[in-house]
Image (spheres, grey):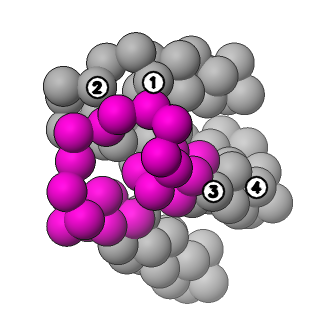
Amino acid sequence: MLSLYIIQVIVMINVVEDSTREAWYFLTIIVSFFLGGREFGYFMFILVLLTMIIYNFQPFIETNLNDIESAVPIFLLIVIALIINLYERTR
């Protein structure tokens, strides 16, 4: 899972035109919860959240995203985390 994360970061930096590249991060978090358990899932969530915040709001690499396009994936990531947390509590 961590090697998948590293590949995703490399793709995210090199493929600037695709605005749906964050969908792969959502899949990584969901799979991390199911395969790695609660602790590893939360670890991957925090790692992906920090990566998205740093990448979307840093001034060094041109992302061609406006403020809304930068904030929507972070909002969706938090919604997915709440849904997974609800699932984990009811399980």
Main SS, magenta residues: helix
The residue that mark 3 highlights is: 50
Q: Which residue is mark 1?
A: 13
Q: Could you tell which of marks 3 and 1 lies nearer the N-terminus?
A: 1
Sequence-wise first label, 2 or 3: 2
Residue at position x 31%, y 67% in the image: 71
Q: Nearer the viewer, mark 3 or mark 4?
A: 3
x 81%, y 60%: residue: 39
Decide if residue 8 is in sight here: no
- Point out the tag, 1 or 4, that comes first from the N-terminus: 1
Amino acid tagged 3: Leu
Q: Residues within 10 Å of mark 1 (few under 14, many from 20)?
A: few
**Residue 36 image offset from top left, x and y in percent:** 73, 43
Report x, y in % for residue 63: 31, 37
Question: How far is the residue under mark 1 from the one under mark 4?
Answer: 22 Å
Q: Are marks 2 and 1 in contact (CB under 8 Å)?
A: yes
Distance between the alpha carbons at the discs numbered 2 and 3: 18 Å
**Marks 2/4: CA–CA distance:** 26 Å
Name the secondary structure under disc 4.
helix
